Amino acid sequence: MPEVTTVDPATGQVLATYPAAGVGEVLQVLAGVHAAQPAWAARPVAERAELVRAIGAQLRKESGELAALMTAEMGKPISEARAEVEKSATACDFYADSGPAFLAPRPVDTGGQQRSWVAQEPIGVVLAVMPWNFPFWQVLRFAAPTLLAGNTAVLKHSPNVTGCALAIERVLRDAGLPADVFRSIVVAEDDVPEASRALIADDRVAAVSLTGSERAGAAVAAAAGRAVKKSLLELGGSDPFVVLADADVAPAVAGAVRSRFLNSGQSCLAAKRFVVHRDVAEEFTARFAEAVRGLQVGDPRDEATQVGPLARADLREGLERQVRESVAAGARVLAGGAPLAGPGAFFAPTVVTDVTLDMPVLAEETFGPVAAVVVVAYDDEAVRLANATRYGLGASVWSADPGHALAVGRRITSGALFVNAVVASDPRLPFGGTKRSGYGRELGEAGALEFTNARTYVVGGGVPTGPATE
């Protein structure tokens, strides 16, 4: 029987082993989730909203235990883990408060005696394929609006956070969600491609949402395309952090450290390429490297820890290769630059400079605590380098003149632009990428409507009572 084993990345010790489902068992779970969807959709939206609110309350009730589980399974510093649980609860609050208005039927004046409106209706079962780096937030930001809309969901989480995946299902059930409205499936790594293909091809699945690697996204999009089903992809990012000549260096450095090293650098929307004007490059780079050298690396269970381990040993090996090959090609290390000795998948917080576009630290996405600094002479050069990537998730531009920053930022292709602020997701704002960072939008009103059918109603032959409301 296949199994999934989770490992503490801070120590390398085994945490737990779970039985994994075969394709037949996965399809049995799907049958239950599909059968539960009509009754769930028939509930008034106000009732569904209150259950979503109850999920947020349950997350807060168990915050300490859930944060500790997250830290054990993927190494997130405990203070950040608690913040992630709270952010997930905040998303539930937002959709409980605002979601019913987003989903309300919208009258449209089409003249004459007829009455017309557009209703946002659920589409059925949505498959969610989610990553390990934000094991609660990634799932709840999907689940809150998707369930509120009247859909049901199947979650295929990353195997190394299997405990989190099962905890999420239990939390939703304990909050009052009916049986089979949301289910987590545990699939062994080798069986993931076959199980995913079977689920996406099954007529009982209406759509799929994936957050993960470009490779996984391409596979899911291809499978969804063959089945003529909607897909949403949130993939990699290599976000530029642009510091213009007139920027205030001190807050820019503080923002740079926060953006790059949150979650030990394991974030799609983290700044990864620091494009700095030559007028402020020397000061920015010196301050940045000094701040990075001062980061507290260690046991993620320690409240003082700012940077924990990478989530898996193979991720550390990949990051080491990227730095090593870049240095061999001429990059210069100002801080860190190598794995840390001892147990666990730790990598020293790193700053490299003298980088060029063909080096791995710029040409590839670096998913860990490594920052690459490149110096430019003009705004046009900053824009060119910022756009010199196949990704387009977020961008951050820093200047004492917000108008100047906006003018530069509008020329950078991205799903989000932040001026004098660190790129971050917010339940109230749509989030997603361009280019190979994916398509579709989560969060905000767009996230509430993403997995709905905008159904047109036209009633003629007199004056009807009007659009049905829940």
Image (cartoon, grey):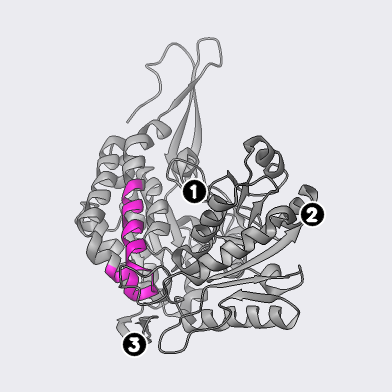
Lower position in the chain sequence, tag 1 or tag 2: 2
Lower position in the chain sequence, tag 3 or tag 2: 3
Front-lying residue, 21 or 62: 62
What residue appears at the point 76 percent right and 69 percent down from the top-left corner? 356
Looking at the picture, which amino acid does disc 2 mark? Ala
Q: Classify mark 2: residues with Cα within 10 Å, few (<14), some (14-19) or many (20+).
A: some
Looking at the picture, which amino acid does disc 3 mark? Gln
Q: Secondary structure at mark 2?
A: loop
Image x and y of residue 386, in percent:
71, 55
What residue appears at the point 40 percent right and 67 percent down from the top-left corner? 306
Q: CA distance from mark 3 to mark 2?
A: 49 Å
For disc 1, the marked residue is 442
Does 253 lie within the magenta span? no
Image x and y of residue 272, in percent:
60, 63
Chief secondary structure of the magenta portion: helix
Q: Classify mark 1: residues with Cα within 10 Å, few (<14), some (14-19) or many (20+).
A: many
Query: Which circle, 3 or 2, is nearer the viewer?
Result: 2
Is 121 above or below relative to 353? above
Q: Which residues are magenta?
A: 68-90
Q: Classify mark 3: residues with Cα within 10 Å, few (<14), some (14-19) or many (20+).
A: few
For disc 3, the marked residue is 13
What residue appears at the point 40 percent right and 23 percent down from the top-left corner? 467
Is 403 above or below relative to 134? above
For disc 2, the marked residue is 377
Q: Quadrant of residue 217?
A: bottom right
Query: Which circle, 3 or 1, is nearer the viewer?
Result: 3
Query: Which circle, 1 or 2, is nearer the viewer?
Result: 2
Mark 1 and mark 2 residues within 8 Å of each other at the beta carbon:
no
Q: Secondary structure at mark 1?
A: loop
Q: Quadrant of the C terminus?
A: top left
Q: Secondary structure at mark 3?
A: loop
